[in-house]
Image (cartoon, rainbow, N blue to C red):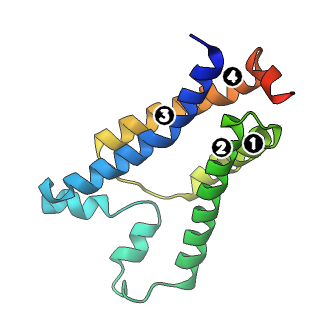
Amino acid sequence: MNLKLIFRILIILSILLPIIGITHTELTMDSQTQEVQDLLEWDGYAGIYWSADNSDELTSEYYITLGILALLLILIIVGLVGMYLFKKWGRTLTVVLTIISICSIALMGVTVALPTYIILNDISNLFFGAIICMSFLEPINNEFNI
């Protein structure tokens, strides 16, 4: 099989798999026990905001964090689209954002998720690592230099 095609398929799968996992979690939420539903609300430090006594009054820190995460997600998708099109800026952007994301993991807090989401997200992360490695190795690296 053509390596360019494999590279592009991995990019598409690395984007789609977490979306499928999140969709599965949302669609099966009602079939979970109330205890599991309460636990699934804990998604990093956002769980603190939602479960606090004053959850109706979200703080400005919550909105700032949400804005930063949304911007990071958009930039990662832009970087992956750039890599899909074999643009050098896409590869650079993706690598820089990956380093930032890895460094910020320690700041994310406790996360509770369903096993299906974890499996799909972990596979996506493996594909993402393969994408970055492939982008710096021959012959895919040559595509970025054209």
Say whether residue 54 is left or right of residue 13.
left
Q: Position of residue 122 (x, y in %)?
A: 45, 35
The residue labelled by disc 1 is 90
Q: Residue at x 65, y 21 (%)?
A: 4
Mark 1 or mark 4, whichever is nearer to me? 1
User: What residue appears at the point 48 percent right and 34 percent down from the top-left corner?
Assistant: 13
Q: Image quadrant for the N terminus?
A: top right
Asked if disc 2 and disc 1 are in contact, CB closer than 8 Å, the reply is yes
Q: Which residue is mark 4?
A: 134
Q: Are marks 2 and 4 in contact (CB under 8 Å)?
A: no
Q: Gap between marks 2 and 4, in whole Å?
A: 15 Å
Relative to 45, is 100 on the left or the right?
A: right
* Secondary structure at numbered mark 2: helix
**Which amino acid type is shown beneath numbered disc 3?**
Leu
- Residue 113 versus residue 134 in the image, above or below: below
Q: Secondary structure at mark 4?
A: helix
Element under disc 1: helix
The residue at which mark 3 appears reads as: 13
Q: Position of residue 116 (x, y in %)?
A: 30, 39
Q: Marks 3 and 2, how far apart in space? A: 13 Å
Mark seen at residue 3: none
Q: What's the amino acid at mark 2?
A: Val
Furthest-right residue in this view: 145
The quadrant in which residue 43 appears is bottom left
Between discs 2 and 1, the one toward the N terminus: 2
Q: Disc 3 to disc 1, how far (Cα)?
A: 17 Å
The quadrant in which the C terminus is found is top right
Q: Nearer the viewer, residue 125 or 51?
A: 125
